Image (cartoon, helix red, strand yellow):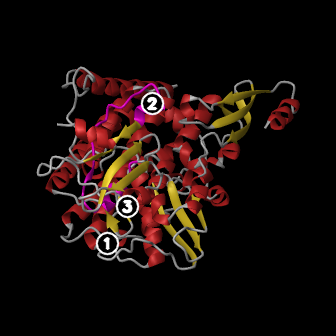
């Protein structure tokens, strides 16, 4: 890495190199970005990864596949249940286990709650990066309700390990349903508050409009998915494009915007809150009775030789698990395609020539979760 | 010139509307819990570290030292040892140690336990000065518990 710094330093006499991170408040974790600056303009950016690398993919090659479940939650601590979902689904697909219908409904409800929770945290933290302290307090107030609801059923507040191969570990009860319904009403009543306090704010408009422009072609080249891609006008969402679990049964929209700037992805995420609420509402209405675990799940999960893939829509984009098996219960190789990694790769191109303060806006709009990039 | 002033007015108005929200919140009930002076009640379903259950009928745990939890644990943080004693059917558990520094709270051990003698504790105020503070002797804990 020292060589890169030298190259950057030599390229011009006026330019200087500044480190943003690895402990910078707006990089949300241990991401380091080398900025080559000319005045206050970032002429060249270089993300440096690896500060939070924990060899998750390698760990998967050393123990039975189902023991990897708690690791999935540690990759993306904001979308733990969605990671659980992707991995459980992968093994179910590989071994051929039917998941009971009630378990699928519970998975969808809790996953969507998790998605809302992730978006609310992003909403607060992003505005915090931009210098607004108040909104995070409102967002966390709402988010706290979701954490309480999920804590009651999963037992933890952040790094959930709730899904099992063949179902979920614990059934939901009447209390869960009432609390979730109450939360739906609560969040809906808060939209107007967020809109007046934040979305209509003139400072936010000026900081986000026309900053960090993306277009579908750039997104394609870098493999960008999720709200960023939808912000450029492409309605691509795994829940609709390649429906998994029981998502095909629900009626929901894929919010899109056309401009592709930070404001577009900001509004896409904000509107996704309502769509997730709609899915939860429909799932609660149609919640069937029955078991939450498949009847016959073998204790030793021998995965037939071959390769398997499973994709889910995480709050940040497309998440894929790819497993190669040699016929034993320990995976030969497990590759995780995490959305933030691809989304981050666009930073050098997207942020070139920006003011430092705009770099913060543009990077915040990516909604980066660093442990997911490094894994 | 005209658009400059209308923009200025629109911007100022958006800030005033935002202030209205925060001022209203100033007079709404307080939602912050002043921990540790006051504590929220946590759900009984909370997953703390594992503990041996003390059954009312026997007055002790029902561990048969089968070692299922030890084998199932993805992080190898449980050590169970049992020994044969004369006049007692099956094995008697003599060591049950948990290294909580490695535990990821997945719950595999609790689910696999054949005698349902493992359960989650409700301890959440865990803080210590050294790693040894998180190496729990569960047999000792079950004896000390009332």
Residues at discs 2 and 3 in contact (Cβ within 8 Å): no
The answer to whether A252 appears left or right of A28 in the picture is left
User: Is residue A255 among the parts visible in the rendering?
Assistant: no
Give percent across and percent down for residue A214: 61, 50
Q: Which residue is mark 3?
A: B68
**Given this view, does label 2 or label 3 mark the residue nearer the observer?**
3
Q: Tell me how far mark 1 sits from mark 3, CA to CA.
A: 40 Å
The chain holding disc 3 is B
| Circle 3: element type | helix
Ranked by sequence position, the earlier of labels 2 and 1 is: 2
Which residue is located at x 34 percent, y 35 percent? A140
Instruction: Tell me, yes or no, whether dots 2 and 1 are on the same chain.
Output: yes
A87 above or below A101?
A: above
Q: Nearer the viewer, residue A178 or A89?
A: A89
User: Residue A343 versus residue A312: which sits nearer the camera?
Assistant: A312
Q: Which residue is mark 2?
A: A202
Horizontal relation, residue A276 to residue A82: left or right:
left
Number of marks in picture: 3
Q: Which mark is residue A302?
A: none
The foreground one among A360 and B55 is: B55
Name the residue carrying label 1: A249
Span of residues in magenta: B105-134
């Amino acid at each position: 890495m020292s060589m890169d710094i030298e190259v950057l330093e030599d390229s011009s006499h006026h330019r200087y190199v500044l480190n943003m991170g690895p402990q910078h408040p707006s990089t949300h974790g241990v991401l380091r970005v080398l900025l080559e600056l000319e005045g206050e303009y970032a002429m060249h950016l270089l993300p440096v990864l690896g500060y939070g690398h924990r060899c998750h993919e390698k760990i998967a090659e050393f123990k039975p596949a189902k023991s990897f479940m708690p690791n999935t939650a540690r990759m993306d601590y904001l979308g733990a249940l969605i990671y659980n979902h992707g991995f459980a689904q992968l093994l179910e697909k590989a071994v051929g286990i039917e998941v009971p219908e009630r378990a699928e409904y519970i998975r969808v409800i809790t996953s969507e709650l998790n998605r809302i929770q992730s978006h609310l945290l992003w909403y607060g933290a992003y505005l915090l990066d931009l210098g607004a302290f108040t909104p995070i307090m409102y967002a966390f107030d709402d988010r706290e309700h979701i954490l309480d609801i999920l804590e009651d059923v999963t037992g933890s507040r952040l790094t959930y390990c709730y899904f099992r191969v063949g179902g979920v570990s614990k059934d939901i009860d009447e209390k869960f349903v009432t609390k979730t319904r109450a939360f739906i009403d609560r969040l809906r009543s808060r939209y107007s508050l967020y809109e007046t306090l934040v979305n209509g704010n003139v400072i936010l408009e000026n900081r986000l409009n026309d900053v960090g422009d993306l277009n579908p072609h750039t997104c394609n080249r870098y493999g960008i998915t999720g709200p960023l891609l939808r912000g450029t006008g492409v309605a691509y969402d795994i829940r609709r494009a390649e429906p998994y679990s029981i998502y095909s049964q629900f009626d929901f929209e894929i919010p899109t915007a056309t401009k592709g700037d930070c404001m577009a992805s900001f509004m896409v995420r904000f509107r996704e809150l309502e769509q997730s609420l709609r899915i939860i509402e429909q799932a609660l209405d149609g919640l069937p009775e029955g078991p939450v675990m498949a009847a016959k799940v073998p204790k030793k999960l021998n995965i037939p030789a071959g390769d398997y893939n499973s994709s889910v829509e995480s709050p940040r984009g497309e998440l894929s698990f790819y497993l190669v098996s040699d016929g034993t219960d320990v995976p030969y190789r497990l590759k995780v395609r995490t959305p933030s990694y691809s989304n981050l790769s666009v930073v050098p191109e997207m942020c070139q020539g920006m003011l430092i303060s705009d770099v913060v806006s543009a990077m915040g709009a990516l909604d980066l979760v660093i442990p997911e990039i490094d894994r | 010139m005209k658009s400059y002033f209308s923009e200025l007015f629109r911007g100022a108005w958006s800030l005033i509307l935002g202030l209205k929200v925060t001022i209203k919140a100033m007079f709404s009930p307080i939602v912050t819990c002043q921990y540790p002076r006051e504590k929220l009640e946590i759900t009984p379903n909370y997953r703390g570290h594992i503990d041996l259950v003390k059954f009312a009928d026997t007055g002790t745990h029902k561990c048969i030292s089968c070692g299922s939890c030890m084998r199932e644990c993805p992080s190898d943080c449980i050590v169970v040892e049992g020994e044969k004693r004369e006049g007692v059917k099956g094995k008697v558990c003599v060591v049950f140690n948990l290294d909580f520094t490695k535990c990821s709270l997945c719950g595999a051990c609790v689910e696999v336990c054949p005698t349902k003698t493992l359960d989650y504790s409700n301890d959440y105020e865990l803080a210590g000065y050294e790693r040894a503070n998180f190496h729990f002797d569960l047999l000792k804990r079950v004896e000390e518990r009332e």
